[in-house]
Amino acid sequence: MATIGVQAMMLKDSFAEIGPFETLRKVAEIGYRAVEVSQIPMDAQNVAELDRARTELGIEFAALSAQVDGEKDQTPYAVLNDLDRTVADCQTLGTKMLRIGMLPMSELRSEQRILDYAKRANETAEALAEHGIALYYHNHHVEFAKIGGRHILDVLADSAPAMGLEIDVHWVARGGLDPVRTLTKYAGRTAMVHLKDYRIGALPEEAITAYEAGDVAGFMGHFKDVVQFAEVGEGNLDFASIVPAAIESGAEYLLVEQDQLYGRTVFEALQTSYDNLVSLGFKNLF
């Protein structure tokens, strides 16, 4: 059975302000027990606090964040050049999964560069597999552009067979695809899914005023910017169908994430997502 947790990108400001342990204590009080670590420095102090949260709060770390290339001692882990530290921190925190949040945008310049990146990603996955750690790739919408007649995500998946996928349903929808059908397509490759809702916000008064004044450029600036991130259950995605589809696809962790909060605190947003998922009948997944 899958576990619903939190993608810690949402928590980076709180980590910096009150530290990982106190932040995760607040997360645990809401009802979450699993966390995917992202966008915080993985220095000795933070790793120690995360380990304390694991021991004292029962927090389970779904995955840590990594990249293929880069220098040692950086965040995310540059696996090919920093394998020993990467493996050691995974072992300390009890996780057997790493995830790549996004490929460098420079790799999107051509099909050949994408293929070269996929080859390095596959080498990274194979190196980690020797230590019992699996590597996954997280999509945004840009991976649903087509190159050579195929979606970039398919190019990556086909060319890096040792690497799994982490499907983000918001970005799937923003890429023009159906989340449930996409989860079904990648069944068996997907160990983690991001639960992130997709909301169309109301047009602001400025947009309506610009429209009435004939200011087409001013109106279109607002018109194109109404897509929002939302608390799970507060947008338009069908999570009553998405969550079962994610579980059926083989997902072990379903991670709540919201990139922008629109004036709310992160803990208010996480509480709303928790409450809505419980209302949908998924309390047993926490």
Image (tube, grey):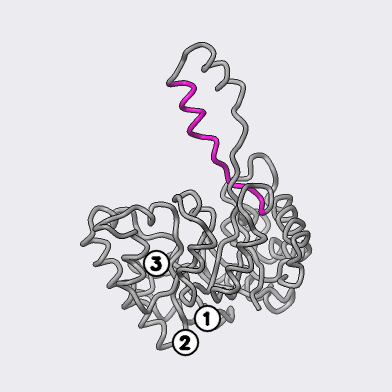
**Residue 44 - label:** none
The residue wearing badge 2 is 132
On the image, the x and y values in percent for residue 200 come to 59, 39
* Badge 1 element: loop
Tell me the kind of residue under disc 2: Gly
Q: Earlier in the sequence, mark 3 or mark 1?
A: 3
**What distance separates the C-alpha of mark 3 from that of mark 1?**
16 Å
On the image, the x and y values in percent for residue 217 come to 43, 21
How crowded is the residue under tag 3: few (<14 C-alpha within 10 Å), some, or many (20+)? many
Q: Residue sitting at 56 percent across and 50 percent down?
A: 259
On the image, the x and y values in percent for residue 35 come to 62, 68
The one nearer the camera, 202 or 69, is 202
Membership of 223 in magenta stretch = yes
In the image, is residue 67 above or below residue 232? below
The answer to whether one can see residue 243 in this image is yes
Membership of 109 in magenta stretch = no
Q: Residue sitting at 59 percent across and 68 percent down?
A: 245
**Residue 67 - label:** 3
Magenta region, residue range: 217-232
Q: Residue sitting at 70 percent across and 47 percent down?
A: 265
* Badge 3 element: strand
The residue wearing badge 1 is 96
